Amino acid sequence: LDDEQFFEKGVPLSLKEQFEATCVLKQLLYQMFWETPVAEQAPFDLESVQLLLSVTRLYNQLYDRHARHEFAHFSREHWHWPAVHSRELADAMTPAEDRGMAAAFGGRRVSLLLTCIPQVLQFKQRVKIFHRLIE
């Protein structure tokens, strides 16, 4: 499908259906990456891991299509998770000298977020984390 069919003709989903789908996907990703991380469950449940990979891929594809159109239909904020406050994320944004050298990069969840679905964090949060990495 090209972008004209996707946005103007609403094939296979209308803009309203895209909006609803991205809300569901975003909530599912929040649960699977952050609240009860599938990647940290042992033993791995193959179906859960496959679902996580599929949802991540679909969410990223929808995001990429909207990004190509400069977020004309949904704002950038639509793609963000609700405010994520955790010690793990705060540690990832704090300079290493303030945390001590023993502190590792933000934890596994933050690493997965930044490599798989960085758009769910606000741009300023991502900049702080990457800035901390290069200090």
Image (spheres, rainbow, N blue to C red):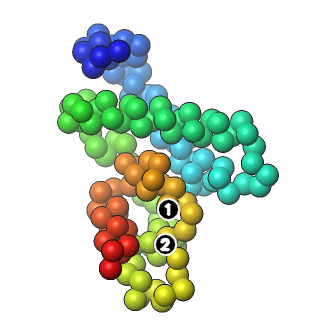
Residue that appears at 68% across and 57% down: 40
Residue that appears at 27% across and 20% down: 3
Query: Residue type at mark 1?
Result: Val
Query: Residue type at mark 2?
Result: Phe
Seen from the viewer's position, the closer of residues 116 and 34 is: 116
**Most extreme residue toward the right, as rendered?**
43
Is residue 49 positioned above or below 17 on the image? below
Asked whether residue 64 appears in the rendered view, the answer is yes
Residue 83's quadrant in the figure? bottom left
Q: Position of residue 32 (x, y in %)?
A: 60, 47
Quarter in which the N terminus is drawn: top left
Q: Which mark is residue 105?
A: 2
Q: Position of residue 88 (x, y in %)?
A: 52, 70
In what element is the residue under mark 2?
loop
Q: Position of residue 36 (x, y in %)?
A: 65, 53
- Mark 1 touching mark 2, by CB under 8 A? yes
36 left or right, relative to 128: right
Q: Which mark is residue 110?
A: 1
